[in-house]
Image (spheres, grey):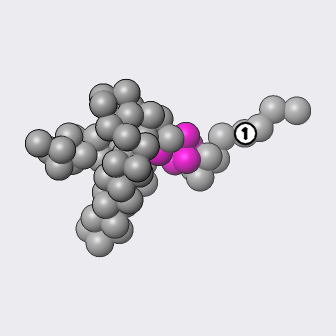
Amino acid sequence: MSRRSTPERLHAARREATKQRLIGEGGTPDQAERLIAQWELQVAQDGLERDGRYWEAGWAWMLAQRR
């Protein structure tokens, strides 16, 4: 039996992929988790939809924060 993709599963998978991408770019797991948590807090305040653009925008935001 295969699992169906749900918005929650897609979000969790994209979140983990972003974390691994940050780690691959030289960050530590703690730094990656902290940046993601900051992003999630920011967008919760802004009301951004959790669609495909969510993590694309998040990646750009996280790169800007690291500079």
Q: Quadrant of residue 22?
A: top left
| Image location (x, y in percent) of residue 34 | 36, 55
| Image location (x, y in percent) of residue 45 | 29, 72
User: Which residue is depicted at the point 20% across and 40% down?
Assistant: 63
User: Which residue is depicted at the point 77% across and 38% down?
Assistant: 3
| Image location (x, y in percent) of residue 42 | 28, 64
- Which type of secondary structure does the marked residue at label 1 adopt? loop
Determine whether 7 is above or below 23 in the image.
below
Our reading of the magenta stretch's main secondary structure is helix
Q: Look at the image and tell me in which quarter the C terminus lies.
A: top left
- Depth check, front residue: 41 or 11: 41
Q: Look at the image and tell me in which quarter the N terminus lies.
A: top right
Q: Is residue 17 left or right of residue 61?
A: right
Q: Is residue 56 left or right of residue 63?
A: right
Which residue appears farthest toward the left when viewing the image? 67
User: Which residue is depicted at the point 28% across and 40% down?
Assistant: 59
Determine whether 1 is above or below 10 in the image.
above
Amino acid type, residue under disc 1 in the picture: Arg
Q: Is residue 9 magenta?
A: no
Which residue appears farthest toward the top when viewing the image? 24
- Depth check, front residue: 18 or 2: 18
Q: Which residues are magenta?
A: 10-15
| Image location (x, y in percent) of residue 66 | 18, 44
**Can the viewer see residue 54?**
no
User: Which residue is depicted at the point 31% across and 57% down?
Assistant: 39
